[in-house]
Amino acid sequence: MLLAAIPSPSVNGFHLGPLFIHFYALMYIVGITLAVIIGRRRWAAKGGNPELVDDMATWGVPFGILGGRLYFDITTPAGMPHHWWGPLAVWDGGLGIWGGVALATLVCVWRLRKAGASVTGMMDALAPCLLVAQAIGRIGNYFNQELFGGPTKLPWGLEIAPAFRPPGYLQDATFHPTFLYELIWDLALAGFLIWLGRRGKVKPGSLFALYVAGYSAFRIFEESLRVDYSQYIFGLRLNFYIASLVALAGLVWFAMLNRKGRVVAPAVLAAAATAADTEVAGTGAADSDAAAGPVEQGTAAADTAEQDASAV
């Protein structure tokens, strides 16, 4: 039996003593937690210290939230609450994914360079994890009855209460559940990146480049459906243009990393072999961080060797 429609929840949170816990925030916490757990396993499988993933989360999450809110404030100023604290009210208006990923990436690159670890290795390890976090986060939009698409009579249409319908759509009852479309896409793309990474036939940094391209490409489709408030340019939503540019940038990045004739394998293998020899010989390090150091430094050396080779 087909669904007549997907019902929207009647509440968006619950009380815990004097506190009101928003499902939106709870979903972000769950998503970030899962991303860290998966990221630790993936980074450890590469021979790195999993505690470095905790450091990425400690620095990346707050700066990601800040970057996401700044992007929202700049691109959707009318969506900010009209109070002095409005620009920082992440619970009222939301976050912009591109601003969040951009600022978090810059901060994490700084931390990785400081630790002497592989930037591209960590980016590839975390790319599927980010998609998992984003997928879980979209469930928060469902509880908020926000960021849905246009009216639809499809059996999986999402019921939206009149109070949450935008002007011009008060007569419509069911809408495209774009939160669900993106959730499915994010998980599918995460699975594809994990599969592709295990094949080992793409250059370092490729998985993150495909994450950028793949997610943004889907947003092109999603932005063509959504009816929530947005800035429009030539009849199209601002984020439609942003998604198009970022998707193109991700594809160009991936193509440049994997272009034919790029002589990187010998340099990368030589650097990795040197790091392995150093680790086998031993340096007398006593603690676990020091023991993990040669592996992470070796992957960083591989990054440097790859960059030098690609410049030839």
Image: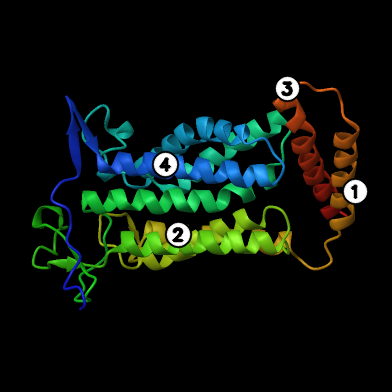
Q: Amino acid at mark 2?
A: Asp
Residues at badges 2 and 1 in contact (C-beta under 8 Å)? no
> How far separated are the C-alphas under marks 3 and 1?
27 Å
Which badge, 3 or 2, is on the more N-terminal residue? 2
Percent of width and height locating residue 140 = 29, 48
Give whichever of 126, 290 is nearer the camera: 290
Question: Could you tell me which secondary element the residue under label 4 belongs to?
Answer: helix
Which badge, 2 or 1, is on the more N-terminal residue? 2
- Camera-nearest label, 4 or 1: 1
Which badge, 4 or 3, is on the more N-terminal residue? 4
Question: Could you tell me which secondary element the residue under label 3 belongs to?
Answer: loop
Q: Amino acid at mark 1?
A: Ala
> How far separated are the C-alphas under marks 4 and 3?
37 Å
Which label is found at residue 68?
A: 4
Left or right, 37 with respect to 303, comes to left
Which badge, 4 or 1, is on the more N-terminal residue? 4
Question: Could you tell me which secondary element the residue under label 1 belongs to?
Answer: helix
Q: Which residue is mark 3?
A: 287
- Camera-nearest label, 3 or 1: 3
Which label is found at residue 270?
A: 1
Give the quarter of the image for residue 66. Answer: top left
Which badge, 3 or 1, is on the more N-terminal residue? 1
Residue at point 21%, 53% (across, down): 145
Q: Which residue is mark 2?
A: 186
